Every structure is written in C-alpha cells, then in structure tokens.
Amino acid sequence: MVEYLPRSAWNARPPNAGPGNLTVSRVEGAVIHWPGTGSTKVIHTKAAVASALRGWQDYHMDTRGWSDIAYQVAVDQAGRAWTLRGLRTQSGANGDNDVNERYGAILLILVTGEQPSAAMKATTRGVIADFRKLYPRGTAIRPHSAVRPGGTDCPGPAARAAIARGEFTPGHVEDDLPYTQAQIRAMIQAEIEEYMKRFWAAPTGTGTAIRMQLNRIEAGISRAAISETQGLDQPLVPDAPPTPDPDDLPDGQHATTAEQPTDGERPADRSTDPQP
C-alpha cells in the first residue's frame, strides 16, 4: 500500500478552479511523465523534491495559467509518493482536454541521463495499482510521447524503456532482480571475498586487531602456565631453624641437638675432671 505525502509536505499553494474529477467510464489508463528540464542535477532529498514541486507549480499556475501543478501524483527516486492534484482530479499535463479526460498523469522526478531506481519503480507500480482500483478500465500505461498531440520526448529514454519492459506494471518483480542467479552468486562471492580481505588481511582490519589481541592473550596464558609448572616442580625444603648464639644460652646448656656428637658419646662433665 502506497503512503502519499500530503500537499502540505511540499507547501503547495491552494489550486484555482479547475476541470474537476475524472469520469470513471472514460479513463483508459495512466501516462508517465518527467520534468524534462534538461538539467543533470539530481533531485533526491525530500527538501529538494519539495522545492522543485513548488517551482513547477508556480510555473504552471503563473506562466501557463493552469489551475494547479499539472500532474496527479509525483514519485521520486527514494520511492516517496507526493500528492499533487490527486488521483481523482483530471490532470492538465497530457496535451489537450480529450487526452486529459482519458488518462491520468504520474510524474517521475528524473533528470537527464538518470535511470529510475528500484524504489521509484516499486512505488510507481503501487500508484498505478491504486489508480486501477479507482478506474478498473484504465489499465493502459503509456509514455507521454505516445499520447501527446504533436509529440514530445517526455518521459525520456530511460522511463520509456522501463515502460516497454513492463517495469511499472503492478505485479512486475523482475526489475528488483535484474541479474541472473549465477550473476547474483558471483557478486555475493566477490563481496564476501572483499569483506574477508578487509576484515582479516588489512593491517587496520577489525579481524587483524582481534587476532593480535587473541595472540597476546594466548601468550600471556602460556607464560602463566610455564611459571606455575616450574613452581610445582621445585623440591619442598623447609627453612632451617635459626642457630642461637652460645653466649645467650644458660650455663651448662648446649645450643641444639645438632651440635651434639653424632657417635653416641657424650663428653665428660668438666666439673668432675681430675685436676692436673
């Protein structure tokens, strides 16, 4: 379902008295237009589109003397649909009163040399589907050049080619997949390889930084494990008790058992030694 931006979104002027609504039984289809200004400066942002619509409305009303901007709905490259006159109101864009009574008018905001985007085509299909709900007999989709008395280049070669391929016809999906399955697989594989190259191989790639960090962590773990293993392999030797100073011992007391003779003999008590 298409969401239409209201006229207030582009600050439209109120229309003057105009031709009124289309007659359902007379409508044969919708006509595709473009601005045809000859400029190659793209009109993509919402602000740029709104400004362009106001300029075209001023030209149509003030210079051409029409009741309003000539088209019913505009579709931009971002896929936004803009309410102009609205789908029920007869347009002033197709060439003369007879053609305007038989066809609606949809403006594609394209510049010279620009291809319609997938979003533009998808929204245009939705607008035409809505148009057909209002006018069940109005199934034709024509370039302006096919209906304007006297001829015109409108809506440009890119849009005419898209019309011929059926890319604005509701239900058409091929334009969203313009490549074969083999081409799509090849493009995906190329994207994956390029991503992996940037991620893992580039010196500043995220993967390279992660790998370096993991290497540092692994090296730190290895050093800690080696240190712990070496510590467990050392013999457990208790600290030797301190040796007391003999001068600090009471008279007649030996320092330690370790200072005693090891052959089981004890020295004679000096107090009983015979006098020389």
Image (cartoon, rainbow, N blue to C red):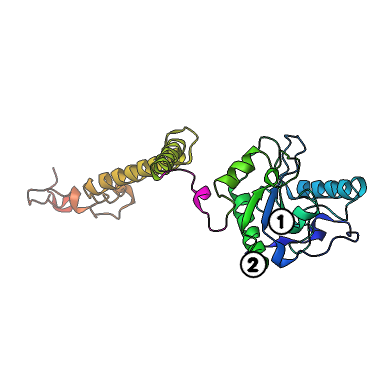
From the viewer's side, name the closer residue of 208 and 249: 208
Which residue lies at the image location 71% right of the left edge and 56% below the top edge? 103
**Residue 133 numbered mark, or none:** 2
Which residue lies at the image location 53% right of the left edge and 58% below the top edge? 171
Q: Tell me if residue 78 is in the magenta stretch.
A: no
From the viewer's side, name the closer residue of 235 and 255: 235
Please indicate whether residue 89 sits to the left or right of residue 29 in the image: right
Q: Quadrant of the C terminus?
A: top left
Which residues make up the magenta segment? Answer: 170-180
Between marks 1 and 2 in the image, the one whose residue lies nearer the viewer? 1
- Report the amino acid beneath label 2: Lys
Dominant SS type (magenta): loop
Answer yes or no: is residue 2 visible: no
Answer yes or no: is residue 59 visible: yes
Could you tell me which secondary element the residue under label 1 belongs to?
strand
**Residue 103 numbered mark, or none:** 1
Indicate the position of residue 112 as horizontal and vertical percent values.
70, 36
Which residue lies at the image location 85% right of the left edge and 56% below the top edge? 12
Which callout, 1 or 2, points at the residue further toward the start of the chain? 1
Q: Quadrant of the N terminus?
A: bottom right
Could you tell me which secondary element the residue under label 2 belongs to?
helix
Indicate the position of residue 90 as horizontal and vertical percent values.
78, 59
Mark 2, residues whose alpha carbon is within 10 Å: few (<14), some, or many (≥20)? Answer: few
Q: Tell me if residue 179 is in the magenta stretch.
A: yes
Residue 188 quadrant: top left
